[in-house]
Amino acid sequence: MRFTVSSSELNSRLAIMSKIIVPNASLPILSDFLLTVEDNKLLIRASDQETTIVSRMDLIDADENFNFTIPAKSFYDSIKELSEQPVRIEVDKDTLAVNILYRNGTFNFAATSLNSDEYPNLKPVSDVRCELSINSETLLKGISSTMFATGDDVLRPVMNGVVLDVTAQDITFVATDAHKLVRLKNSKFSGKITEGDSSLLILRKKPLNILKMILAKENCDIQLVFGEKSWMMHLPDYSVSSLLIEGRFPNYNAVIPQNNPYTIWVDRLTMLSALKRVSLCTDEATGLIRLEIKDNNIQISAQNIDFSTSAQENVPCQYDGDGIVIGFKALFLMTMLSNIETKDVIIKLSDAARAALVMPSENNDGEDLLMLLMPMMIKA
């Protein structure tokens, strides 16, 4: 049993599929890829039980249809250093050995498995709640703009994913860890809600991180189907299914302040560069930076008492309100500015104890991006 495939194309697929493999998996077979040769195509399946991904690619040639499992890490490591060339992969029916033959040599693998029955398949979606048709660029923008705000609290798993809040008018991507929140509304999509007037769905981070790698190379409309406990999507060369995070997500609209009277308009890259320099002197435990805003100027300062270091820098802005002093975690504010694309950003404040709003100076057509950041206490 053998087939021939392009090394570079195979490598690009394995680079993505390997991200789903869990080291020391509870089921030994989950440390493997499942490879299926079918009608001159190669299907590569990877799974961690919660998420399953199938990749499809054309073969140069194949002698018959068959499938087998192979250790994921060893297989990927053997392919990724090869230059572009045809690679022939042979599987011995009797010994179950796998041989990879390339231009200047071979890789030989010991016994593998021809039994694919134990390998997880794509999870079927039951009790469909919502169906969406969305452009790959729109989905990628929603994931990329919100992923950084997700939490990592095992006691509050609903905060550890990205929320899709789907209504008949728009789709809203939301993520929060209780210290920061990002909300991106988009009305440029088509969808069908089969239960009630809206559906609120919480997607796990791991499959979304892999989706970012896939969507970066796509430009097409994607069909997504969401059920009570799982979701599934199909792209031209990939299929993905995963479990949803179950639980009740907080009312994110309730925490967004509606009246922040102080508005700051500032060049995004100038502000970001200044924050990067000043943040070098923040206290390692808190990461606190101090912003003093008055007279069209933001004075950014930080100090680390333990190492007797401090820094201060002034950034021009447009601001004509009363003077205000407020503290933030430097990393959070820098990450927010890094995930906005416009030349200028708008920061809306109320007082030193209430949440700040950070947003682009203008939104793309059909989009509404808003970020919320909780302040930190500044010691006198």
Image (cartoon, grey):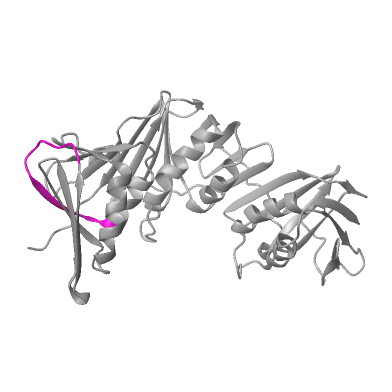
Residue 110 sits above or below residue 10 on the image: below
Picture quarter containing residue 216? top right
Picture quarter containing residue 266? top left
Residue 277 screen position, x and y as percent: 29, 59
Residue 155 screen position, x and y as percent: 36, 60
- Asked if the stretch drawn in magenta spans residue 323, the answer is yes
Quarter of the figure that contains the N terminus = bottom right
Residue 107 screen position, x and y as percent: 82, 68
In this picture, residue 192 sits left or right of residue 42: left
Quarter of the figure that contains the C terminus = bottom left
The residue lying toward the viewer, choosing from 260 and 363, is 363
Residue 91 sits above or below residue 273 on the image: below
In this picture, residue 155 sits left or right of residue 283: right
Q: Which residues are magenta?
A: 317-330
- Asked if the stretch drawn in magenta spans residue 102, the answer is no
At horizontal 66% and vertical 62% (from top left) the residue drawn is 30
Decide if residue 251 is in sight here.
Answer: no
